[in-house]
Amino acid sequence: MLISYVNITKVTPKPMYKTFTYLLLFCAIFMLSPKLTVANSSMELAFTDARFGDKEIIKLYPNPMITDATIKISEDINLDNQKVSIVFYNMVGSEVYKVSQIKNYEQKITKESFKNSGIYFYQLIVDNKIASTGRITVK
């Protein structure tokens, strides 16, 4: 009679929090390179896109947002002929708020649009293409 023994060892998965932390750090450093400017004694983040040269195509201020914030879109984007929207995402990547069919170059958003305080990422979408990205802190 032949008896064989199988050695079964417990395999533990590697923690994912380190990978997630490195991913967030990568996004913050390389993908969201903001240029800080001062306007009306408040800090505002201005982002540029290669399709528009060195021109600032979106400003979102004040950052951090306490009650409301202003979104200013560059007049280089033709709001009459182009489909323009802004989508906000939480840290997990779930869509939280969307401003569709933007028709004004300046628009207000309120804190109530975001369910919780925290850091949110946004994408400016022009004709179904991401034209710019950024982040905003909601207090």
Image (spheres, grey):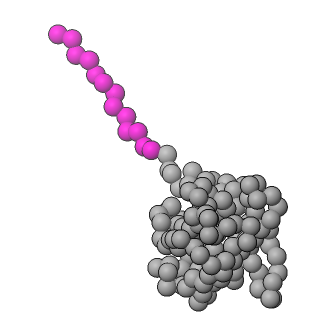
| Quarter containing the N terminus | top left
Q: Is residue 137 visible?
A: no
Using the image, determine if residue 64 lies above or below residue 80: below
Which residue appears at 67% of the width and 54% of the height?
A: 26
Q: Is residue 93 visible?
A: yes
Q: Is residue 25 magenta?
A: no
Q: Write down the quadrant of residue 119 in the picture.
A: bottom right
Which residue appears at 56% of the width and 57% of the height?
A: 128
Q: Position of residue 73 (x, y in %)?
A: 69, 73
Q: Write down the quadrant of residue 51 in the picture.
A: bottom right
**Most prominent secondary structure in the magenta stretch?**
loop
Which residue appears at 81% of the width and 88% of the height?
A: 41
Relative side of 25 to 98, left or right = right
Which region shows up in magenta?
A: 1-13
Q: Position of residue 63 (x, y in %)?
A: 68, 80
State the residue lying farthest toward the left. Answer: 1
Relative side of 11 to 86, left or right = left
Comparing 31 with 55, the one in front is 55
